[in-house]
Image (tube, rainbow, N blue to C red):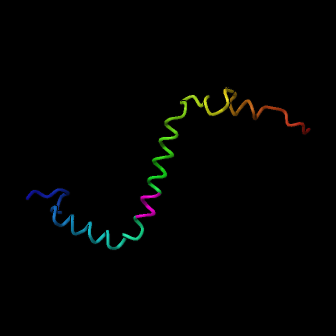
């Protein structure tokens, strides 16, 4: 058989994967949960208007305009 990653054969890769699964298997559920939340957040970010106008109530004021507003303090 032809090695896939330089010197490791497919059967050796399966064995290494099994050892990794045994060592780090208890962390996989939390890792997959975090990945799932990240994907959902990413998709929500994609759905938003690229200009950012839909989630700001129609106002097109930038953050710089708000920073220049007078605060009433001297």
> Which quadrant of the rendered structure holds the N terminus?
bottom left
Whether residue 55 is situated above or below residue 37 in the rendered picture: above
Residue 67 relative to residue 11: left or right: right
Q: Position of residue 32 (x, y in %)?
A: 42, 58
Residue 41 vertical position relative to residue 28 in the rendered view, above or below: above
Instruction: Left or right? Give the position of 45 relative to 72.
Output: left
Residue 60, relative to residue 3: is it above or below? above
The quarter of the picture where the C terminus appears is: top right
Which residue: 35% across, 73% down?
23
Looking at the picture, how far across and down is residue 57, in whole percent? 67, 30
Q: Main secondary structure of the magenta part?
A: helix
Residue 12 spot, x, y in % from top left: 18, 67
Place residue 49 in its image quadrant: top right
Chain part drawn in magenta: 29-33
User: Which residue is pictured at 40% across the width and 71% down the height?
Assistant: 26
Which residue is at the far right? 74
Q: Measuring 10% from the left and 56% from the top, which residue is drawn there? A: 2
Residue extending farthest to the left is 1
Q: Quadrant of residue 6?
A: bottom left
User: How many tags in the picture?
Assistant: 0
Which residue is rendered at x = 36% and y = 69% of the image? 25
Q: Is residue 13 magenta?
A: no
Q: In the depicted view, which residue is nearer to us: 6 or 26? A: 26
In the image, residue 10 above or below residue 40: below
């Amino acid at each position: 058989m032809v090695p896939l990653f330089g010197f490791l054969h497919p059967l050796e890769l399966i064995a290494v994967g099994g050892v990794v699964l045994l060592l780090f298997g208890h962390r996989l559920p939390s890792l997959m949960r975090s990945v799932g939340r990240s994907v959902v957040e990413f998709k929500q970010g994609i759905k938003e208007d690229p200009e950012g106008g839909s989630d700001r109530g129609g106002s097109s004021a930038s953050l710089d305009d708000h920073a220049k507003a007078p605060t009433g303090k001297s």
